[in-house]
Image (tube, grey):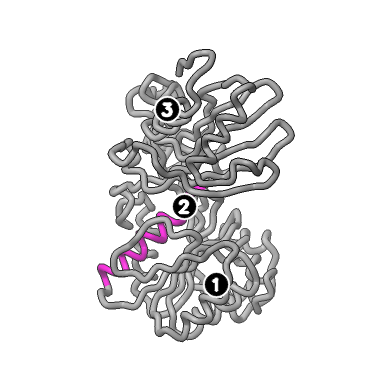
Amino acid sequence: MNHSAQPNVAQLVEQILLEAIQFRASDIHFEPTSTELQVRYRLDGALKTVESLPAAISDNVIARLKVLGNLLTYRNDIPQEGRIEGLKDDAVFSEAGKVTDKRLAVFPTIYGQRAVVRIFYENEGLMELEKLGFNDYIESALKNFSRKNQGILLLTGPAGSGKSTTLGALLRYILTQCPGKSIVALEDPVERAIEGITQVQIEPHGEMTFPVALRSLLRQDPQVLMIGEIRDAETATIAIEAGLTGHVLMSTMHSGSCSGALLRLLEMGIEPYQVTSGVSAILNQRLVRRLCQDCKQQTGDGIYRAVGCEKCHDTGYHGRVLLAEMVELDGQLREAILKRSDMDSLEELLTSRGHMNLMQDGRRLVNQGITTEDEVRRVCGT
């Protein structure tokens, strides 16, 4: 980007937002330092600095974002959250799909206010379970779970690992396989409307919390329940009860592994016998960057490496792909949970049974020339 020394701030902000959409950025970071305001795009999960603006216009840039997000411009000392509207992007499409939402979060720092805009896209290619990119075993296991009449499926993984997309695709699959089923989703916030599903928005500071809504909904005769996230012991307890009383329930939890999610339930005070009786499976997933098809190079051993070109903004990657691991609870695993085995013991048990972990699923993608070993290690944290 090239901007004049004294740019029109309103035009500048709009240009940054629209350019981010054209680049398929999922987030835009406006980060103040002692000397400048750094603008960074999150492209395919990795942050890239695209602009350094003068510190003199930093406050004006943030103020303009707050106007677009209907936030209080005169309060610079508190965190604020809102939605950006009024941009001329209704007809803007990027390769990621049409923009459905732009969320703004502003936070005070010692150098001024920091702002992050998260952009949501409607990607038609990620609506169906078969198109998400799971390996054959996991796709088949998820379809089998979708046909059950009771049980709990928990999705784990960091923020931005595609958990909501997977849940949405699963709900659509259930709708097509079992039309007429009563399906209710509790979300904070509702990210994408799904025809045929009752969706309820849980406001972060409202009276209708996840536990309140969940308890009431169980008296509304739902067959399938989706909860955006299990964050506390109370929600976990009601969710487990639902899974034990003839409901199919799907939700997400923050955990780094399948074993970790099971242990977290125990830490929340859920009894081991309730975990073993209620939970059907744990799915742990990540998104890794896909090698750019225009510039990737094959090495001597047949593996491809990232190079970088104009199309991928010199990153060597373009787009993302899913890698995942899934654990279905069986006799051995249930026995270990009943004994309150620790993380190492559970991991050892899974390894002895030939469980395919994230790194192994990643190697499948490396061998197919879809991503690199370095990228898999970066994302899996090994």
Residue, x 35% and y 62% (percent of image)?
140
Q: Earlier in the sequence, mark 3 or mark 1?
A: 3
Q: Residues within 10 Å of mark 3 (few under 14, many from 20)?
A: few
Q: Which image quarter is the C terminus in?
A: top right
Residue 336 or residue 131, whichever sits in front: 131
Q: Which image quarter is the N terminus in?
A: top left
- Asked whether the beta carbons under mark 2 and mark 1 sit within 8 Å of each other, the answer is no
Residue, x 33% and y 24% (percent of image)?
294
Residue at far front of view: 74
Q: Which mark is residue 324?
A: 2
Q: Earlier in the sequence, mark 3 or mark 2?
A: 3
- Asked whether the beta carbons under mark 3 and mark 1 sit within 8 Å of each other, the answer is no
Residue, x 48% and y 59% (percent of image)?
189
Residue 145 or residue 102, whichever sits in front: 102
Q: Position of residue 251 (x, y in %)?
A: 49, 66
Q: Earlier in the sequence, mark 2 or mark 1?
A: 1
**Distance (Cα) linking label 2 and label 1:** 33 Å
Q: Tell which tag, 2 or 1, sits nearer the viewer.
A: 1
Residue to which mark 3 is pinned: 15
Q: Amino acid at mark 3?
A: Gln
Is 122 placed left or right of 33 in the picture?
Answer: left
Residue 234 or residue 250, whichever sits in front: 234
Q: Does dot 3 land on a helix, a strand or a loop?
A: helix
Residue to which mark 1 is pinned: 208
Q: Which residues are magenta?
A: 160-177
Residue, x 30% and y 56% (percent of image)?
128
Q: Position of residue 292 (x, y in %)?
A: 37, 29
377 w.r.t. 2: above or below: below
Q: Position of residue 259 (x, y in %)?
A: 60, 62
Q: Which mark is residue 302?
A: none
Is 313 placed left or right of 343 in the picture?
Answer: left
